[in-house]
Image (cartoon, rainbow, N blue to C red):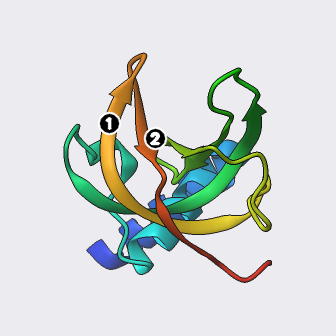
Amino acid sequence: MVTDEGRVSLRRLLRRLTADEAEIEAQELRRESAECGGVPARQCRRGQVVSVSGRLRTVVYTPRTNLPTLEADLYDGSDVVTLVWLGRRHIDGIEPGRHLTARGRVAVRDDRKVIYNPYYELEPPR
């Protein structure tokens, strides 16, 4: 006789075996973000002060004539939040693939969630 717990374990195993790498990575990032106490990025709303945790996907320096910016897309498995440091060209440790936790007020720019000049903590390299 199979118990409900056994069915759940079997379903979880089958889901994991048939999932592609992106789905597995997203699940792991959501789990790690929850362990760090981060708010899922998909739940962040304009004006909220939040703490989000995840992996940097891209880091781009945008040279502008009046104010250079460093922008990084933080992915937590549910959505992306763009972190923007105004007046910065480079920050040691801010590089693609790096895990970090960022805190700040969410804004929306071009239908994207953005945190300007966030407080951040770098996670140890893995």
Question: Is the C-beta separation of discs 2 and 1 under 8 Å?
Answer: no
Give the quadrant of the C terminus. bottom right
Q: Residue furthest front?
A: 66
**Observer-nearest residue: 79 or 31?**
79
* Residue at the disc numbered 1: 107
**Label 2, residues with CA under 10 Å away: few <14, some 14-19, many ≥20:** some
Judged left or right of residue 111, residue 92 is: right
Kindly tell me whether residue 112 is visible in this rendering: yes
Position of residue 102 relative to residue 126, above or below, is above
Position of residue 78 relative to residue 61, above or below, is below
Give the quadrant of residue 9.
Answer: bottom left
Residue 71 point in image, percent of width and height: 64, 40
* Residue at the disc numbered 2: 79
> Which residue is pictured at 51% across the width and 72% down the height?
32
Give the quadrant of the N terminus. bottom left
Q: Secondary structure at mark 1?
A: strand
Q: Amino acid at mark 2?
A: Asp
> Which residue is pictured at 26% across the width and 46% down the height?
43
Q: Secondary structure at mark 2?
A: loop
Give the quadrant of residue 51.
Answer: bottom left
> Which residue is pictured at 60% across the width and 68% down the height?
100
**Observer-nearest residue: 3 or 112?**
112
Residue 13 point in image, percent of width and height: 57, 64
Residue 91 point in image, percent of width and height: 75, 60
Kindly tell me whether residue 3 is visible in this rendering: no
Q: Amino acid at mark 1?
A: Ala
Position of residue 68 relative to residue 10, above or below, is above
